[in-house]
């Protein structure tokens, strides 16, 4: 018995032993990583042709294939009235050359099983390595000697216009277009877009000119990656590109865009939308070479870099509002780029989603991120950096960036070092600097009838745009909701609001003293005296500097003075000054033949306002906004021309106070383009402190 | 004699050598099929599991389940808390995702190669004991609805596939789309989700692929450790209803609120991607619309300006394929004119042999596609899983090109004649919704 028992125990022990041997893993514990893999960062071989073309070659013989890419590092171009030239150019180039007819060229590329694609800023080809010499030759010929015919031009033009229609009702296409247009303005290369009208302005000569000016080798980089040898590439490239005429592409600079003056919603109505496209954005200046680049990369990774980031975890995994919520920051060596946090959300949760976006942006700007978030973000970059090296294109991309982005030669060798050096404090600092909580533009593209009511409850000013970024009325105000109010009523309400028409009529002169902020690095003093109907003296001075600028006008003639130089008012300036009515212009409109129309309602300074269009007898147009509730003037808008550009000049009026029984705004904020300054009045007197003598020239 | 012979052999092996994807495959006792592919050129490793369950395995009253699982199975396991999955992957420098189609569901993680064990642990956790509960179901139900709105309901031409499938398939479960019905998902109970998991998420219905910078022996040991103890599930039989042949033309119309230009869609029901005929149809679609010199593009878009775009797609699947020709007419061309023009080119294929040069062009294109199909370890892993699970021959990753190469011009003509006939197809007018 005992023996048997013993044997049984040994058996049990043996089984137990073998079981433990077998089940040696403890799956309740997450496995620890092994030692980090070693990174091999190779560098491409390089050479340059006399015409400026730089060539980078990465030999990789794993597969019998080659990729060739040409990158033209040209400054962006504003196409303006002819937006679409580059699209047409890209559609036309690569269809034959001066010596090979179109059909033959296309057939040969297809026949070799290869592809060559051209764009406005370069070209890309893929081929089996055995056909590399011929594909390189076809690509070189295609880009140096393209065949541009009138017939092809017409065809591509028709296709481009027709193609615009395939996206005409696309909610996402409209959203992306308006988001860029509102961020940059349509007179910036990054904000403009192609329309049927702009395509119709283009001629074949425009396409040819684009090729001539921009497809030049000075800032061109040819990259060859794959199953080739350096010497083979060098021989072939020298042969095929030697006759590419050396030239530099034009470098035109454009005014940098500016952010929204205050955080606001920009709404685009798309009645067919089943989801709202939300993009919360502001502009940032960030180059790859900036020290802030790495901290901001980490900050953005934590905010919205992927499935482990706050926006995704909050809006998708916690709330189920969306399939994905992300944020991104670009980098650009020339112009500001956008920070964009975005998601497509169902109509019903549009306003709640906006609230969550704002909450997350606020949080990352005010609280330090956790140690776990920071180390996870770093780990993600460490991992993706290591893994990106699997692709032989990566080496070439790194080398190209070093050349074009003004980076130190060891930028990528020390890349992970820089990532790993980022601290929680760095993240907080850059989040505060680059996520501009007070200047966000929240672009919502969606179905007004289902989402607008919710958005209106967020207590943010809302401006409305059509799908081409033109300002429009609130789409929910149907035609019969448009103000039936006539201009007379708006004016009468205003006069009543300031104290009554009689009181206004009795104002003969106004004296004011104010300080002006934002126009100069030091405080400015403004003294102004006006008298009906059009007499005016204004003086800007600064402590210790005396008078800086002065305007004197006696009703018939006058001058401007700056730094001791007097210039008489003449021509258009004189007649404008004559026609100006500085004191209650509302009293003069009817008798002087101004054309007035009430154009609708708009949100101004978070109040609903009548928009009054005012056209002078000379045809000059301006807009005045009167609060619907209080009747007071909130804002004026006029276009002015300066240095060949048309800018909108806006003045907003606030802080109305009583002066001798009349309500007067004590704060006026003026903005012209990117400039903005605020005038705060310290003293205003009515019918005292001003005499005729003040206006003598 | 001998010398010339061996020279020939040398050339052949040199060519194959540049292309060969080496792999090792075996079954664990619980039925899990394992495929290992070693490539130490970059420090990257992928762990992926393909499950032989797709939209076609769903209850017709519960469409969308297979795809729903692709979301649900990121919610957590007994050892990975809810919300931790993505964090673990990121914190270890990895990336992950999953995809679902009508035939299979595929999950993967890509990590720097020092995290191979982590990837195996996560995938084995998902298979062994995922947590499926009401919170996860409710959250992902909303997310999936957003995915449908994003990809289908808010996109121009987003519902073409739905319109084609419901007309081409009457009995087979390919008649619904992978994303499925939101009403079905709303109506589903937790028990139904648990039952679906128990039935399909078992090792004997799965293929594990580990590819990249690995050591084969160590990897085998780890696979055994993590996946060995997972119990085998009940056998799954796949017995789907067969479709009756289409013998008379089907005409249909579908209206889309997101478009302004109509589109013409022609669709034929064709055989499984496992068949030789399906591969011939792949070549036909390349001939018709791939590249600027392809016949439909050249004639309809370039020369005659009758179409803004035209595309032939052989949508290959496990049980049947769908051969679709899609065109957006331009200028004054009507939808029916466009169909007639497309028919003219198909008729030519059915009567004349394509030229020798066009034939050589197809061969070159196939070779280029083949070379470019296995450029990353994650691409290789996905191909290995598909070839094993759906085609039944993992080595097709190396040999499928030979099948294509053996196709003749005569076969192209015969297959066009066999399948691409007006009485065997759907003609769908895909039109803008009238404003209400």
Image (cartoon, rainbow, N blue to C red):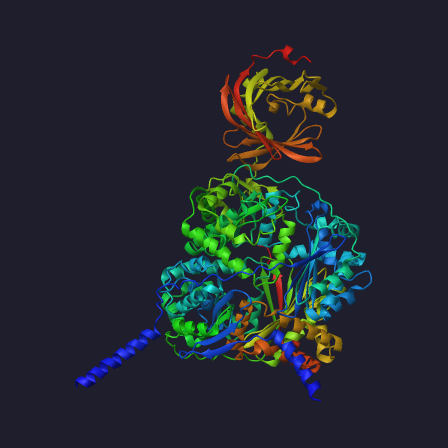
| Front residue of A62 and A108 | A62
- Asked which quadrant contains residue A256, the reply is top right
Give the side of residue A162 with respect to residue B226, left or right.
right
Counting from the top left corner in percent of width and height, residue A209 is at 78, 50
The correct choice, above or below, for A326 with respect to A513 in the image is below
Residue lying at 65% horizontally and 39% vertically, measured from the top left = A255
- Across and down, in percent, residue B273 comes to 57, 77
Question: In front here: B23 or A590?
Answer: B23
In depth, the one of A326 and B11 nearer the eye is B11
Residue B259 placement, left or right of A20:
right
Extreme residue toward the bottom, this view: B1
Q: In this view, does A562 lie to the left or right of A369?
A: right
Q: Residue at x 26, y 78 (%)?
A: A13
Query: How many marks do you count on the picture?
Result: 0
Instruction: State whether residue B273 appears in this view.
Output: no
Asked whether residue B262 is in view, the answer is yes
Q: In which quarter of the image is the C terminus of chain A?
A: top right
Split into 4 quadrants, where in the image is the N terminus of chain A? Answer: bottom left
* Residue B257 place in picture, x, y as percent: 58, 57
Locate residue A240 relative to residue A294 in the image: left or right. right
Residue at the extreme left of the image, as rendered: A1
Query: Front-most of B31 and B3?
Result: B3
The image shows residue A681 at horizontal and vertical percentages of 53, 22
Compared to residue B62, the image places residue A614 above or below, namely above
Residue located at (23% from left, 80% from top): A9
């Amino acid at each position: 018995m005992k023996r048997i028992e013993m044997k049984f125990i040994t058996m049990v022990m043996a089984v137990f032993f073998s079981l433990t041997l077998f089940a040696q893993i403890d799956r309740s514990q997450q496995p620890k990583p092994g030692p980090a893999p070693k990174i091999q960062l190779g560098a491409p071989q390089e050479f340059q042709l006399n015409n400026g073309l730089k060539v980078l070659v990465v030999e990789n013989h794993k597969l019998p294939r080659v990729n060739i890419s040409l990158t033209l590092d040209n400054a962006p171009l504003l196409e303006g009235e002819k937006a679409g030239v580059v699209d047409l150019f890209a559609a036309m180039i690569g269809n034959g050359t001066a010596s090979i007819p179109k059909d033959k060229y296309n057939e040969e590329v297809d026949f070799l099983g290869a592809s060559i694609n051209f764009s406005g800023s370069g070209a890309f080809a893929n081929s089996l390595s055995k056909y590399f010499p011929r594909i390189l030759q076809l690509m070189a010929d295609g880009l140096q000697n393209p065949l541009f015919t009138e017939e092809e031009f017409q065809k591509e033009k028709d296709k481009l216009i027709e193609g615009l229609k395939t996206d005409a009702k696309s909610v996402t296409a409209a959203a992306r277009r308006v988001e860029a247009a509102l961020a940059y303005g349509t007179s910036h290369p990054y904000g403009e877009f192609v329309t049927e009208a702009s395509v119709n302005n283009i001629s074949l000569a425009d396409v040819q000119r684009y090729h001539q000016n921009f497809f030049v080798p000075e800032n061109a980089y040819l990259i060859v990656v794959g199953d080739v040898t350096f010497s083979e590439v060098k021989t072939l490239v020298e042969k095929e590109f030697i006759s590419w005429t050396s030239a530099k592409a034009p470098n035109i600079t454009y005014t940098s865009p500016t952010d929204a003056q205050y955080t606001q919603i920009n709404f685009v109505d798309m009645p067919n939308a089943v989801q709202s496209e939300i993009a919360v954005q502001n502009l940032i200046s960030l180059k790859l070479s900036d020290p802030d680049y790495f901290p901001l990369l980490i900050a953005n990774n934590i905010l919205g870099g992927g499935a482990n980031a706050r926006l995704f975890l909050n809006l998708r995994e916690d709330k189920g509002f969306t399939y994905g919520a992300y944020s991104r920051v670009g980098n650009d060596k020339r112009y500001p780029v956008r920070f964009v946090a975005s998601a497509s959300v169902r109509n019903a949760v549009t306003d709640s989603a906006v609230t969550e976006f704002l909450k997350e942006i606020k949080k990352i700007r005010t609280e330090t991120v956790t140690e776990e978030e920071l180390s996870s973000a770093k780990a993600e970059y460490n991992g993706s950096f290591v893994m990106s090296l699997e692709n032989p294109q990566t080496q070439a991309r790194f080398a190209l960036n070093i050349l074009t982005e003004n980076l130190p030669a060891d930028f990528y060798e020390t890349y992970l070092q820089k990532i790993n050096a980022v601290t929680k404090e760095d993240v907080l600092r850059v989040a505060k600097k680059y996520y501009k909580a007070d200047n966000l533009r929240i672009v919502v593209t969606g179905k007004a009838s289902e989402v607008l009511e919710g958005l209106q409850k967020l207590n943010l000013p809302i401006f409305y745009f059509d799908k081409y970024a033109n300002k429009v009325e609130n789409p929910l105000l149907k035609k019969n909701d448009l103000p039936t109010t006539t201009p007379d009523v708006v004016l009468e309400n205003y006069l009543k609001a300031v104290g009554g028409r009689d009181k206004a009529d009795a104002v003969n002169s106004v004296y004011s003293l104010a300080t002006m902020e934002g126009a100069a690095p030091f405080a400015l003093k403004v003294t102004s005296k006006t008298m009906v109907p059009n007499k005016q003296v204004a003086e800007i001075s600064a402590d210790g500097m005396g008078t800086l600028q002065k305007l004197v006008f006696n009703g018939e003639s006058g001058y401007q003075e700056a730094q001791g130089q007097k210039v008489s008012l003449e021509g258009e300036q004189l007649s404008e000054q004559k026609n100006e009515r500085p004191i209650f212009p509302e009293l003069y409109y009817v008798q002087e033949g101004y054309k007035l129309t009430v154009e609708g309602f708009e949100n101004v300074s978070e109040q609903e306002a009548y928009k009054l269009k005012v056209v002078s007898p000379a045809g000059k147009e301006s807009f005045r906004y009167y609060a619907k509730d209080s009747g007071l003037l909130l804002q004026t808008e006029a276009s002015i021309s300066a240095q060949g550009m048309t800018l909108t000049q806006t003045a907003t009026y606030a802080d109305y106070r009583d002066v001798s029984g009349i309500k007067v705004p004590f704060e006026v904020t003026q903005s012209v383009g990117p400039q903005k300054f605020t005038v705060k009045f310290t003293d205003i007197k009515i019918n005292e402190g001003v005499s005729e003598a003040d206006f003598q020239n | 004699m001998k010398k010339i012979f061996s020279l020939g052999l040398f050339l052949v092996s040199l060519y194959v050598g540049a292309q060969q994807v080496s792999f090792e495959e075996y079954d664990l006792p619980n039925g899990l099929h394992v495929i290992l592919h070693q490539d130490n050129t970059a420090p990257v490793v992928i762990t992926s599991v393909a499950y032989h369950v797709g939209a076609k395995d769903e209850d017709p009253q519960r469409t969308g389940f297979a795809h729903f699982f692709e979301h649900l199975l990121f919610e957590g396991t007994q050892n990975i808390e809810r919300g931790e999955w993505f964090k673990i992957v990121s914190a270890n420098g990895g990336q992950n995702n999953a995809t679902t189609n009508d035939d299979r569901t595929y999950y993967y993680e890509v990590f720097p190669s020092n995290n191979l064990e982590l990837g195996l642990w996560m995938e084995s956790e998902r298979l062994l004991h995922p947590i499926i509960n009401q919170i996860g179901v409710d959250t992902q139900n909303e997310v999936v609805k957003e995915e449908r709105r994003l990809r289908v309901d808010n996109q121009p031409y987003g519902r073409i596939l739905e319109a084609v499938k419901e007309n081409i398939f009457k009995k087979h479960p390919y008649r619904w789309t992978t994303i499925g019905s939101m009403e079905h998902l709303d109506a589903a109970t937790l028990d139904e989700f648990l039952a679906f998991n128990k039935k399909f998420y078992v090792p004997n219905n799965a293929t594990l692929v580990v590819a990249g910078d690995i050591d084969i022996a160590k990897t085998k040991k780890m696979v055994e450790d993590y996946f060995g103890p997972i119990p085998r599930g009940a056998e799954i039989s796949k017995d789907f209803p067969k479709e009756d042949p289409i013998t008379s033309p089907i005409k249909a119309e579908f209206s889309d609120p997101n478009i302004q230009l109509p589109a013409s869609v022609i669709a034929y029901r064709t055989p499984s991607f496992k068949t030789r005929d399906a591969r011939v149809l792949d070549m036909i679609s390349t001939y018709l619309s791939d590249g600027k010199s392809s016949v439909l593009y050249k004639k309809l878009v370039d020369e005659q300006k009758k179409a803004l775009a035209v595309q032939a797609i052989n949508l290959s699947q496990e049980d049947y394929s769908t051969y679709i020709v899609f065109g957006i007419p331009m200028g004054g061309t009507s939808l029916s004119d466009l169909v007639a023009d497309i028919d003219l080119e198909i008729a030519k294929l059915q009567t004349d042999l394509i030229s020798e040069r066009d034939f050589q062009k197809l061969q070159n294109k196939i070779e280029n596609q083949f070379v470019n199909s296995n450029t990353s370890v994650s691409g290789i892993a996905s191909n290995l899983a598909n070839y094993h699970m759906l085609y039944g021959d993992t080595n097709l990753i190396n040999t499928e090109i030979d099948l294509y190469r053996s196709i003749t011009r005569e076969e192209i003509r015969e297959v066009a004649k066999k399948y691409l006939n007006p009485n065997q197809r759907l003609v769908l007018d895909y039109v803008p919704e009238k404003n209400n």
